[in-house]
Amino acid sequence: MAKDKKRKVKKGGFAEIAFRFSRSKTAMIGFVLLVLIVLVAVFADLIVPYDKVLEQNSSNLMATPSKDHWFGTDPLGRDLFARVVHGSRVSIAVGLLTTIVAMVVGGLFGIIAAYYGGRVDMWIMRIVDIFTCIPGILLSITIVATLGPNFINLVLAMVVTSIPGTIRFIRGVVMGVTENDYVEAAKSYGANDMRIMLKYIMPNAMGTIIVDTTMTVAGCILSASGLSYLGLGIQPPSPEWGAMLSDTKQYLRTSPHLLIFPGLAIILTAFSINLVGDGLRDALDPKLRD
Amino acid sequence: MNEGKGRALIETRELKKFFYTPQGTLHAVDGVNIRIDKGCTLGVVGESGCGKSTLGRAILRLHEPTSGEIYFDGDDLMKYDKKKLREARKEMQMIFQDPYSSINPRMSVYELIAEPIIINKVCRGKAEIGKKVAELMETVGLAERLTGAYPHELDGGRRQRIGVARALSLDPKFIVCDEPVSALDVSIQAQILNLLMDLQDSMHLTYMFITHDLSVVKHISDEIAVMYLGMCVERAPTNELFRNPTHPYTKALLSAIPIPSLEMRHKEIQVIKGEITSPINPKPGCRFAPRCPLATDECVGHDIEFREISPGHFVSCIHADK
Amino acid sequence: MADKLLEIKDLEVIYQSDFETVHAVNGVSFSIERGQTMGLVGETGAGKTTTSLAILRLLPDRTGKVLGGSIEFDGRSLLDLKESEMREIRGEKISMIFQDPMTALNPILRVGDQIYEALELHNTEKKTTEELHKRVDEMFEMVGIPPYRKREYPHQFSGGMKQRVIIAMALACEPELLIADEPTTALDVTIQAQVLMMMRELKERLGTAMIMITHDLGIVAQTCDTVAVMYAGSIIEYGTLEDIFSKEKNHHPYTEGLFASIPNLEEETDRLHPIEGLMPDPTNLPTGCRFSPRCPKCMEICKTTPPPEWEENGHRIACHLFKKEVQ
């Protein structure tokens, strides 16, 4: 039998995961889309200066898309394109910030619950159970309504509603990893708990956790839009996609462009993140390895 | 602090490890007395549920024993506090069974072997650590080019060599080998067994070799202890055990091994009836009685003595010398 | 009725992934007669499981491919059959027992129902429900489990008992060929003895032919009539039990190595004599004889030319060493 070509790519390494990811058409579409959206958010100022967001032109209200106003104008005569572009910043920021905080705090408790087990686990999980009984939407509405609607409180509300689920998830992942003999082996030559958690458990749980994280970001963006739609999130005149939908919902039949553009923005962002998350999960799944 | 207990490096007295479950108390290790002399190998044999793995871990206090004494070079390990135990751990190490789950897939060969050294601050500075790792790799037969390799690139045999190198890194005196070759192919098993035996000679190691494979244990052990449901039912020097197995369970165990030879094809196999009974809340008496062809009424209801029927040969069976 | 029950010629199977091609089976030929037991011996990666999956056409869809060769069962070519025809064969004419009893049974179905299901699917004689249930009871008794336990779930059985249930399921439809893939590896030695004895009795009673896949030469000695030794996807030695175990006959160096690396209960040995090196990478097999890098008797020709087959009265060895003895 003739010799086959040597493996070009190291098995299991980052390069292999990236390669496998790139084989999936849907994942790549999601990735490209996501990169575009992030670039738009980062370079929003360069694409369209912020004053355009605020500039009201009362002679040109609710105009349909044209050469001067690519997405048309809103009921106050503001350029819709500028508002959608700058709105991306808010959405991405909220989604990322919430996810990071929820992952760090939730992750900490999840790891502690899983690693120490016993009573510690029991107490943490009972508290998680209590929070899970409260519907997420109601909880976040309550928090924002009580503390006042602004960016920070929005993030806070979403963090509080996300944490229980995060704790449960990470606990599950860590429990699976802790079952491996190498954790016991580390204990046998004197590794302390901190070292075990940082060097043995975390690196092996990261893959699964990262995939879940991407999904959480998408969920947060949708939730933030929902809350802003209810008037509980970002306040005017800051542009936020959900708020834009809320402000113009009565014009759905007469000037649909007012809702289509922000709506599409929300959908595309969440969708692209989900595609990337799916692609990552498939790329990391050892069972799909041949 | 050696109270003159001969040359025994490890000695346990009535070592017990119980697990408390909703169904009752699981007697995993129920009063085991063993003794391993310096430089020797005790083979611990038994099938699933006999408690051999738990025994190995209990001796190292990886599972905290429920009661009993463990003497390491004359000192009772049970009396050590956390700090002293950590120090003592350097002298007692373990080689694990599954070469796939016992090494961290995210660490390179170098990091895996250096880990115990780094944690216990045995060496000073990177250069010294590097030198020690290289020495260990050579000792266990791992090629130098594998220093930066990751576990998933290596086969079971090489992974197990990492396990051995790691166990040796702290210059231990005693190593518990928990089924170190069971997960390996036959030809690789032989390689690792030879390695372990060579190391024992050159480094004066004492082993407790846990396995279910009697042919492997015969090869490597000086003395063998047979376990059943948490208790030691027979213990004897290797040759004596094979020449003169006394306990009905030992006899059945030996006879059940399929021999790779034509002449033995139709040999009489003593098939034990039934299945192993539950280790939860066991009744006093011989644990093997429900399945034993020789069982009588005297076998149950009271503890059976572990007695010496010939020099060094102990059995816990009342029918032993009939 | 064809002469031989199963006849395989020059079978070649690969696993093809995005990265590489694994040459799992490379030109395997053997035959089995009715009622005969053949031992398929080899270490991990030799290709034994792949061969058996190929016979039942159970290779993974996306990646497993039969490149060439033929598999004839009772005169019919299995590779040419439609999937629906294969389904009639699986479980009914050819059954398979897998290695791990813990995961082979459906945890949410009662064990009796699982055997019943097998009977129902292959009910060619259109038996009534009562007759089928009666048969389930018969099977339980045959494998030594009291029939009242058929209402229990798999988790209520120990490993050895589970394996008995699996054997009952496999033999329920009285297949002509049973493929047992390391059926006792996961079991304790005393339970293994029970299960092997039971399998032997059943085999004799039902006249089933069997392929016993194992790496344990002791099991081979106890249960098999013929033996095929596999290495890196090929059969390097094939013969009757006597041919393989008899010390006076010729042997492939790998076979000799296998015997030498087993710690022997009968003899005293200081050191074991393992085979040096490792099984080759199946994506990158050596040229010439696959065993040449590890062979203590390797000659120059072994490295470049695939070995010819030496034969004497049905005992075949693929090795250059015996070439001179071919007529």
Image (cartoon, rainbow, N blue to C red):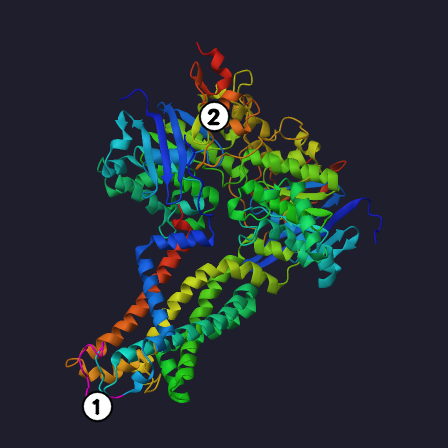
Q: Residues within 10 Å of mark 1 (few under 14, many from 20)?
A: few
- Does A65 lie within the magenta span? yes
**Left or right relative to A80: residue B141:** right
Extreme-bottom residue of the structure: A58
Q: What residue sits right under mark 2 in the picture?
A: C289
The mark lying in front, picked from 1 and 2, is 1
Q: Secondary structure at mark 1?
A: loop
Q: Is residue A195 magenta?
A: no
Q: Position of residue C189 (x, y in %)?
A: 54, 37
Name the residue beneath numbered marker 1.
A58
Q: Quadrant of the C terminus of chain A?
A: top left
Q: Amino acid at mark 1?
A: Ser
Label 2 lies in what chain?
A: C
Q: Is residue C114 above or below residue C319?
A: below
- Residue B315 visible within the image: no
Residue B291 in the figure: left or right of residue C146: right
Same chain under badges 1 and 2? The reply is no
Q: Residue at x 29, y 79 (%)?
A: A82
Give the secondary structure at mark 2: loop
How would you classify the magenta stretch by its main secondary structure? loop
Seen at 61% across and 35% down, the residue is B191
Q: Residue at x 47, y 24 (%)?
A: C304
What segment is highlighted magenta in the picture?
A56-71
